Image: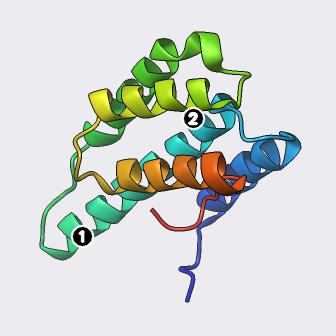
Amino acid sequence: MEPKLNPLDQFIAARVVSKVAALPTATVEMFLEVLSSKLVQQDKKETLQEMKRGGRGNIYRLGLLLEAAEKVKSDVSQYLKRDDPEAMEALKASLQRRFTSNFPPLKGMLKQIEAWTTRGKKPTLIGI
């Protein structure tokens, strides 16, 4: 069962989906859009878990995650419009360098990159 999204989340999801749907192939740029969405989803999930336990959530986490995503984008800037194996390997290397290995969005992104390179399956926003 999908959680009900508030209007802001619906707007963000619609923008990302429209950008992803507009791209004909799974370029590095598309994967970076999906990564940003997954980072926001992860932050929201962790914040809700912290609030259930009586905490307030980490107000700095999302900014730090998006900063790491920008560093990945900077690392692979020469590959943004490419979808070939060399570009995907550069993206994977940068992701692994910028995020910890047990981070759910990283695991999901690596699986989606692998699915693209082996089966030609575009990335999705479903789950983290």
Give the camera-side residue of 110 and 2: 110
Establish if 1 lies above or below 10.
Answer: below
Image quadrant holding the C terminus, namely: bottom left
Q: Label 1: which residue?
A: 49
User: Where is mark 2, residue-wise?
Assistant: 32
Q: Quadrant of residue 8?
A: bottom right
Instruction: Name the residue type under label 1.
Output: Gln
Q: x, y (%) of residue 92?
A: 44, 34
Q: Position of residue 98 (x, y in %)?
A: 30, 28
Between marks 2 and 1 in the image, the one whose residue lies nearer the viewer: 2
Marks 2 and 1 close (CB-CB < 8 Å)? no
> In the picture provided, is 68 more to the left or to the right than 85?
left
Q: Is residue 26 left or right of residue 73?
A: right
> How packed is label 2: few (under 14 Cα within 10 Å), some, or many (20 or more)?
many
Query: Quick check: can you spot residue 89?
Result: yes
Give, as a three-letter code, the residue at label 2. Leu
Of all residues, the one furthest to the top in this rendering is 78
Seen from this angle, which residue lies furthest left?
54
